[in-house]
Image: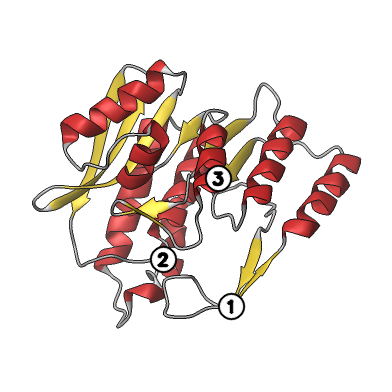
Amino acid sequence: MGTEVHPLATAILSNQTGYDSFKSLSLTEYMPDFINEWGKLNADFDAILTGFVTDTNQIRIIDSFIDKFKNPNTIVIVDPVMADNGKLYDGYTEDMCNEIRKLCFRADIITPNIAELAFIAEEKYSENMEDINMYVKKLQNCGMRKIVVTGYKEESTISNLVYDRNDFYKASAKLTGGYFSGTGDILDSVITGGILKGMTLIDSVRLATDFISKVIENTQVKDANDGIDFEKFLGDLI
């Protein structure tokens, strides 16, 4: 999408965590060294996108990264990866969730699923639209700016809900198949890429929703943990 990306890796995994087993090598101790080197080079970032973390120290390192590199023009997007279907992911502690919650309040945009939204709002999990609106209103009253709630399911559609201050938009697609691993990461990437190309948040979410919907319709995998076949459609984003 025309953006040069520099990953600050939090871990190296043999395979993603949805499979029955995996091996993970945490890179917590190396993260400050990377940050220091980028500081020496006077690195300048147009956006900072955060995702999967393995421990509380990593969240604090990311927090200091934002202190060091965010300038008035840097967009901070936080995907508060920690839960789904009302339950925390394995290995996520209360301390980690509290630190992720604090990180969300530093973001310009957050992209939680419904379970993560409820945890951040410190409310009981519910998929009811009235409750989702209540969670969002509570967070906006506490200072959060823009919230994209992902994976809201209705009878035959799945939607990403955009709350941009007083504006609301629902980007919907046909609900096809079941759960596919990795779609949240792709959604965040396309939203960020769209914003960096000058698109509005609503247009970026619409682009990401349409892209993932098209890819899912053309994906054939035996195991949903294998993810979706997005590679051959990347040209659509250019």
What residue is at 81 percent from the left and 52 percent from the top?
34
Q: Alpha carbon of mark 2 to alpha carbon of mark 3: how far?
A: 35 Å
Total of numbered circles in the picture? Answer: 3
> Residue type at mark 1?
Lys
Residue furthest to the front in view is: 94
Image quadrant assignment for residue 179: bottom left
**Residue 235 rendering spot, x and y as whole percentages:** 46, 59
Query: Taking 194 as reference, is 118 left or right?
Result: left
Q: Nearer the viewer, mark 3 or mark 1?
A: 3
The residue singled out by tag 2 in the image is: 230
Query: Taking 67 as reference, is 180 left or right?
Result: left
Determine whether label 2 and label 3 are within 8 Å by CB. no
Q: Is residue 9 above or below residue 136?
A: below
Of labels 2 and 3, earlier in sequence is 3
The residue singled out by tag 1 in the image is: 23
Q: Is residue 33 above or below residue 132?
A: below
Q: Nearer the viewer, residue 46 or 71?
A: 71
Task: Confirm whether residue 45 shows in the render.
Answer: no
The residue singled out by tag 3 in the image is: 95
Q: Nearer the viewer, residue 152 or 105?
A: 105
Q: Nearer the viewer, residue 207 or 12?
A: 12
Secondary structure beneath disc 2?
loop
> Residue type at mark 2?
Phe
